[in-house]
Image (spheres, grey):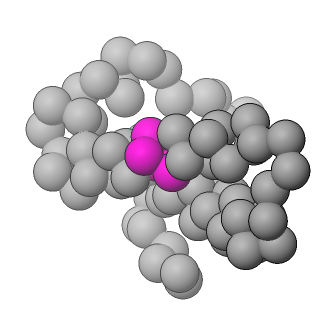
Amino acid sequence: METEPTAQSQTQLVETSEEYLELAKKHSSYDRRIEELGSRRFPSQEEQIEEARLKKIKLHLKDQMHSMLRGQPEHATA
């Protein structure tokens, strides 16, 4: 059974892997923008499209980060 990565392993990767750190920064940045777009009462069609696009990108980044935590090769498909 596969175990979930720990906070300690995430901290270690942030401190030692430039690639993981960059992914984490992008993930956080996209998360903030998604929150901003989601808080709008009447988002435009463009904003709705942007929010959906960012959610997909953010999910892909999270998958890449989890792959790195598990020590598996990264699957770059975005």
Give the number of callouts: 0
Q: Magenta stretch containing residue 11, yes or no?
A: no
Location of residue 15 in the rendering, given as x and y in whole percent from the top left corner: 15, 31
User: Position of 34 compared to 40: left or right?
Assistant: left
Q: Which of 46 and 33 is in front in this view?
A: 46
In which quarter of the view is residue 55 placed? bottom right
* Main SS class of the magenta portion in the image: helix
**Residue ID at (63%, 29%):** 3
- Residue 11, horizontal then vertical, whole percent: 29, 23
Q: Which residue is drawn at 24% across and 27% down?
A: 12
Q: Residue furthest right?
A: 42
7 up-or-down from 16: above or below: above
Magenta range is: 27-31
Q: In which quarter of the image is the N terminus?
A: top right
- Please name the residue shown 64% across and 38% down the image: 35
**Which residue is drawn at the image coordinates 35% and 16% (left, top)?**
8
Nearest the viewer among 52 and 45 is 45
